[in-house]
Amino acid sequence: MTSEPRYHQSALSGFNVLFENELLDARRSKRIIAFLAIMTLSLLLVFVIGYVNVKTFGDGARHVIQQSSMERMVGTWATLVGFMGSLMVIAATVDAVTHERALGITSWIVTKPVSRLSYLSAKASAHAAIACITIVIIPSAIWVTLSLVFFEAVPAAHIIVAAGILCVEMAFLSFVVVALGVVFRSVAPVAVCALAVWFLPNVVPAISSLNWTYRILPSYLPIAALSVALNEKETYALTIPIASIILAALAFAAAVLQFERQEL
């Protein structure tokens, strides 16, 4: 009777240890640091271009910016973080499972009091958290702060909600790429499939009978984020994140079931 609680306790402990180790490795990762620097500098450039294009300078530090200029700034932010960020999170996660499996680390870890579910969950959760922090939260916070200091009428509340949708994107890709690492044992097919999963569905809504799919496709998450940031009040801004979470959960669950049966 006591074995099951002990098993769950050891599984939870194993998850925590692996999760913390992944975060520690991320702090030392040159790749993650490079992505953080690139995204931050890109958004700083967006701010500088917006400042240069200001036509009305008020008496105070905050300047009046035209609505069209503000919308262009917000659109550029959503595009950079949404689309360039998707490539970054795929590149950061593509070898999360395959590298350790090739070195025999995976087979060694799961011989410890750590379940395979805990191993995969820790991998995916850590990479999702890292991607959200380094690709979305920190660069966007710097950009929004500068915009609030120097510009008037910045839709900060809407941008924060939109950033949450972009975090859903980072989590979706992290969990899906980790799941693909279970299916394939080398980096190349994982990368190809991840890019295909993310970009190929964009052509589906072009088919007239499948036009409705743009309301649920995860690859439209940047569009949903932009819609929220511009306060367009579109229903797909809600349906796309929900569908993305469900699809990621299904893909990850299928990967866990396969991982349980695999020989490492």
Image (spheres, rainbow, N blue to C red):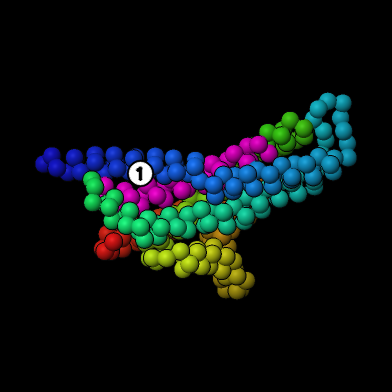
Residue found at x 76% / y 49%: 72
Q: Where, quadrant-wise, is the N terminus in this rendering?
A: top left
- The secondary structure making up most of the magenta span is helix
Question: How dense is the environment of label 1, judged by Cα within 10 Å: few (below 14), some, or many (20 and up)?
Answer: many
Quadrant in the picture for residue 87? bottom right
Closer to the camera in the image, 187 or 213: 187
Q: Which residue is at the far top?
A: 60
Residue 35 in the image: state x and y as whole percent: 59, 48
Residue 180 in the image: state x and y as whole percent: 42, 62
Residue found at x 26% / y 47%: 114
Q: Tell me, yes or no, if residue 254 can be seen here.
A: yes
The correct choice, above or below, for 205 with respect to 61 in the image is below
Q: Is residue 50 left or right of residue 228?
A: right
Q: Which residue is at the far left?
A: 1
139 inside magenta stretch: yes
What residue type is disc 1 on? Leu
Q: Where, quadrant-wise, is the C terminus in this rendering?
A: bottom left
Residue stretch in magenta: 114-143
Q: Is residue 105 left or right of residue 244?
A: left
Residue found at x 83% / y 35%: 64
Q: Tell me, yes or no, if residue 233 can be seen here.
A: no
Q: Secondary structure at mark 1?
A: helix
The correct choice, above or below, for 243 with respect to 200 in the image is above
Residue annotated with mark 1: 18
Residue found at x 84% / y 41%: 52
Residue 242 in the image: state x and y as whole percent: 49, 52
Closer to the camera in the image, 21 or 168: 21
Residue 200 in the image: state x and y as whole percent: 56, 69
191 inside magenta stretch: no
Picture mark count: 1
